[in-house]
Amino acid sequence: MVRKDSEGFEFIVTSKEISKIMGVTEARIRQLTKEGAVIRVSHGKYDLAKSFQAYMTYIENKKEEVLDKTIEEAKWTKARRRKTELQVQVMEGELHRSEDVERVLNTMLGNFRGKLLALPSKMASRVAGKTDLTEIRDILKSGVNEAMTELSEYDPKDFYSDDVVEEDDDLDE
């Protein structure tokens, strides 16, 4: 049954009519009504023009949801790829974890500091009684060079802890 609005346009239709127009079942019309995609004016009666506009908006929103899901899946894939690339760089020694760098540098600098602090005691006995400034300078220089070798003994293997690549599967869930 079709009724006319105040301007004489025919807009009010039954649930059976709107289901045929939209190509869906009457049960689907009830679902769409609950979702706000079809506008009911009274029991079993629908405003066709407003329902059409609401349904178009509903379809656009569904398309955006699908697009958003696709974008999020692409971001997820990119993040997993980036994680894998970083793990490979760690395994190949091209990238070091900050905690490994901190551990190695703390060890190296701690050892260097110890050698520097030991220099006066170690060198005092060697230069005791010496009067030749060149000889004293050479002895002190050799002590400083010996301490500095601590910093030059870099070994890339020092940067690897026992768990070279942590199995952090947060991104794989």
Image (cartoon, rainbow, N blue to C red):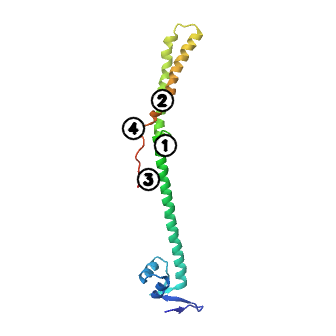
Position of 168 with respect to 65 (left or right) is left
Q: Are marks 4 and 3 in contact (CB under 8 Å)?
A: no
Q: Residue at x 43, y 82 (%)?
A: 25
Query: How far is mark 2 from mark 1, CA to CA?
Result: 24 Å
Q: Which residue is mark 4?
A: 162
- Residue 36 in percent (x, y) is at 48, 77
The numbered dot on residue 89 is: 1
Query: How far is mark 2 from mark 4, CA to CA?
Result: 19 Å
- Tell me the crowding category of disc 2: few under 14, some 14 to 19, or many 20 or more residues within 10 angstroms, Cα based: some
Task: Using the image, determine if residue 4 lies above or below residue 64.
Answer: below
Secondary structure type for disc 2: helix
Task: Using the image, determine if residue 71 lies above or below residue 117.
Answer: below
Q: Which residue is mark 2?
A: 108
**Which callout, 2 or 4, points at the residue further toward the start of the chain?**
2
Query: How far is mark 3 from mark 1, CA to CA?
Result: 18 Å
The numbered dot on residue 78 is: none
Q: Residue at x 51, y 17 (%)?
A: 120
